[in-house]
Image (cartoon, rainbow, N blue to C red):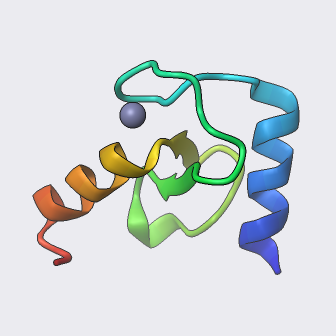
């Protein structure tokens, strides 16, 4: 599955905190977010977020 692969790659190469709030990402609850939804799950088009930030982003986009 591409999405899982990209996520694993992100975690390995970035070692970054949440892209929004800069809190360290918990191992199990990080969420991979597409910067542009139409562009799919590519390494360049994704970022890792913590779960609360992901929820906020989804709400702002009107997905809920
Ligand atoms: Zn966050």
Residue 32: quadrant of the picture: bottom right
> In the shown orientation, is residue 63 left or right of residue 10?
left
Q: Residue at x 12, y 56 (%)?
A: 60
Q: What residue is shown at x 85% (from left), y 63% (from top)?
A: 5
- 58 or 42: nearer the eye? 58
Location of ligand 1 given as a quarter of the image: top left
Q: Is residue 43 above or below residue 14?
A: below
Q: Is residue 62 above or below residue 58?
A: below
- The quadrant the N terminus occupies is bottom right
Q: Can you say which quadrant of the picture contains the C terminus? A: bottom left
- Which residue is drawn at the image coordinates 76% and 41% (left, top)? 10
Taking the image as shown, residue 6 lies to the left or right of residue 44, namely right
Q: How many marks?
A: 0
Where is residue 25 shown, x and y percent of the image? 59, 33
Q: Is residue 46 above or below residue 40?
A: above
Left of 24 or right of it: where is 4? right
Look at 83% across and 52% down and name the residue there. Answer: 8
Quick check: 40 above or below 24?
below
Between 2 and 54, the one lying in front of the other is: 54
Observer-nearest residue: 12 or 23? 23
Q: Image quadrant of residue 11?
A: top right
x, y (%) of residue 50? 47, 42
| Picture coordinates of residue 55, whole percent (x, y) | 28, 58
Residue 21 place in picture, x, y as percent: 35, 24
């Amino acid at each position: 599955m591409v999405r899982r692969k990209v996520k694993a790659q992100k975690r390995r190469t970035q070692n970054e905190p949440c892209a929004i709030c800069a809190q360290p990402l918990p191992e199990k609850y990080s969420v991979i977010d597409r910067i542009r939804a139409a562009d799919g799950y590519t390494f360049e088009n994704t970022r890792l977020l913590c779960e609360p930030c992901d929820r906020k982003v989804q709400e702002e986009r009107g997905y809920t």
